[in-house]
Amino acid sequence: MTIKEIKEKLESTLTHKRFVHSLGTSDVAGRLAELYGTDKKKAEIAGLLHDCAKELTLAEMQKNVEQEGIQVDAAVLKRRALLHGPAGSVLAKTLYGVYDKEIVQAIYFHTTGRPDMTTLEKIVFLSDYIEPSRDFPGVDQLREKAEENLDEAVMAAYNSTIKYLLDSGEYIYELTFLARNDLILKKGK
Ligand SMILES: [Fe+2]
Ligand SMILES: [Fe+2]
């Protein structure tokens, strides 16, 4: 599928708001990829498709990952907010014909992150957070940081996500802590 075809298909399956969010994520990801010297086209495609499974029901997401033989923790399997990453990585292949491993992984981990993230994974994670339709206190500082230092910006995004989840009494998936700590341990190395 060409990028144009991917966009058309996405537009017909996502809400308008989510489609705009996906376009924004793709644009920012492409720009950051250029800035940090990684594949621009892969970043744009991963940005476009990162939320491609987000409109599915939980049962549909579960079916998707099961069919593909993907093993996820019980905690992930029960939450659309976490499962749409793995489910999206399946749809990227089955519905959009995108098999590139790096792109598929970036979609898989875009919500939780993980230790040892690739530059592409960091870029998609961060672009999702700061794309132009996002509006929350501190987003502009984060946008500036994203242009200056990728790791610091990703860490700031983790910190703010974890604080938000703590404050709202939500479940926090352990991979997010591990991802954040991994960046701290590697800082300055
Ligand atoms: Fe997402
Ligand atoms: Fe998103």
Image (tube, rainbow, N blue to C red):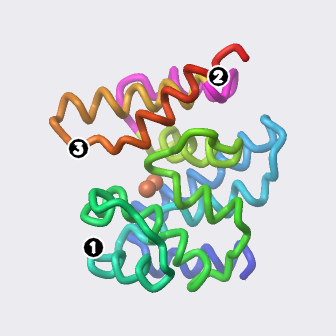
Query: Could you tell me how far apart the alpha carbons at marks 3 and 2 are, in whole angstroms?
Result: 26 Å
Q: Depth check: give the residue in front, 10 or 120.
A: 120
Q: CA distance from mark 3 to mark 1?
A: 17 Å
Q: Is mark 1 within 8 Å of ligand 1?
A: no
Q: Quadrant of residue 183?
A: top right
In the rendered image, the quadrant that contains the C terminus is top right
Q: Is residue 114 magenta?
A: no
Quadrant of the frame with the N terminus: bottom right
Q: Position of residue 27 (x, y in %)?
A: 65, 51
The answer to which quarter of the image holds residue 8 is: bottom right
Q: Residue at x 49, y 26 (%)?
A: 181
Quadrant of the rendered image holding ligand 1: bottom left
Question: As shown in the figure, which amino acid type bears the numbered disc 1?
Answer: Leu
Q: Is mark 2 within 8 Å of ligand 1?
A: no
Stretch of the chain drawn in magenta: 135-151
Magenta stretch, main secondary structure class: helix
| Residue denoted by label 1 | 58
Q: Position of residue 132 (x, y in %)?
A: 52, 42
Residue 138 part of the magenta-drawn span: yes
